[in-house]
Amino acid sequence: MKVAEGDEVLESLSMGERLLLFWNNLDWVEVGIALAIFLVFIVFRKLFTKYIFKIVIRLASKTPTEVFTNLLLSFERPLRVFWIILGTYLALAYLPFHITTFQFVQGMYRSVIIILLGWGLYNFTSTNSSVFFRMARKIDLDEHSMLVPFVSKLLRFGVIAITVVIVGGEWGYNINGFVAGLGLGGLAFALAAQETIGNFFGGIIIITEKPFSKGDWIETPTVEGIVEDITFRSTQIRTFADSVITVPNSTLSNEPITNWSKMNKRRVTFSLGVMYSTPKEKLEVCTREIEGLLKKHEEIDPGLILVRFNQFSHSSLDIFIYFFTKTTAWAEWLRVKEEINFEIIKILERNGVSIAFPSRSIYVESDKHFLGDISEDDRQHDSERS
């Protein structure tokens, strides 16, 4: 009965009065025990981190799925903080005057626990999570697909939003009014941000249709370069001038996109013009030798090789050359193309064939009678003037 009356008196006191009463009646033995409780949890935290958690991870890695292991690793750092929070709470709970019964203290601890849970889920929804890799394998996505980071960003945003809403509810904020406000505000937002919403859905189209992946070399009427990242609004592309261009997703999703990184081989095509004075036999020999060169070259794809005397141009006889290199890397492609060009020059020099250059021949016809008549008319005209 006395205890009940004491509790009623204690509840009638303010927090400052409780703390003052607590300090005046402080029992240092109880303080020492509370401190010992806190130190036990600190030591247990270290043991848990170094030994127990590693053993649990080792056992979890033997399971058929990696989800549980990934979940434990996501909550590793939040668990370290949790042991400190738990030790602090139990130490304070042991002290007299029931500090942990204060509404403010309880709200603080509940908020911290919610934040730790949100922290773990935030880590679990990272792009390295095995959940996303399993999802990518099921829907046949390549490892460079941007769907994984895009979904990861959506889930992380959701985790943060839910955590903030729950913590706000712990402190007495009206969540129902907030949610209802989101419905009305969402309509106004949709009307005011049509372009942003268009960019968002444009990004969804890009990552679902997969016209390109992160790291691909693409070309559109707007930009050409290497894809670096895709966000809710735009796609970032690094150009070959080493600048980054941000293209709205709505623009990019409505343009024709050439993905040069999807090449299995890289094309080389050009016309080789030789002089009109080249004999037919030498022209035919050069054509066959160039074709043989391309067929024997180890870095030329043998699938399609065309070397043909193609046409009579204005100032040259044109040999059409068409082939593919096995490499698609630009620097290697240029090296192979250079080697082929040098070998073609050797073939032409060996056969005494010269490369033509743009030229024009002018022929002047002379008519003696016509020139004689002109001269006679000029002499008569001169005599009349004199």
Image (spheres, helix red, strand yellow):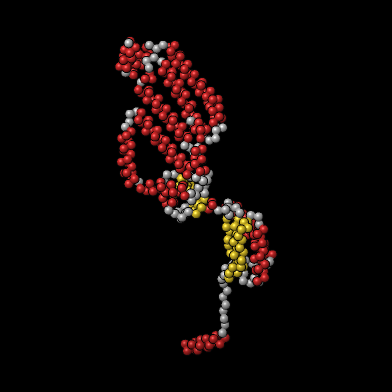
Q: Residue at 33% of width from left, 13% of height from top? A: 4
Q: How many marks?
A: 0
Nearest the eye: 260 or 182? 182
> Is 21 left or right of 275, judged from the image as shown?
left
User: Is any part of residue 131 visible from this angle?
Assistant: yes
User: Is any part of residue 386 visible from this angle?
Assistant: no
> Is 101 left or right of 306, judged from the image as shown?
left
> Hey, which quadrant is residue 326 in on the image?
bottom right
On the image, the x and y values in percent for residue 307 come to: 62, 64
View extreme (right): residue:
350
Nearest the eye: 137 or 76? 137
View extreme (top): residue:
2
Q: Is residue 375 above or below residue 222?
A: below
From the image, which quarter does the N terminus lie in?
top left
Q: Residue at 31% of width from left, 38% of height from top? A: 181
On the image, the x and y values in percent for residue 155 come to: 43, 38
Nearest the eye: 341 or 368? 341
Q: Residue at 38% of width from left, 18% of height from top? A: 99
On the image, the x and y values in percent for residue 301 come to: 62, 56
Q: Residue at 45% of width from left, 43% of height from top? A: 150
Q: Is residue 217 above or below residue 48?
A: below
Q: Is residue 30 above or below residue 322?
A: above
View extreme (front): residue:
64
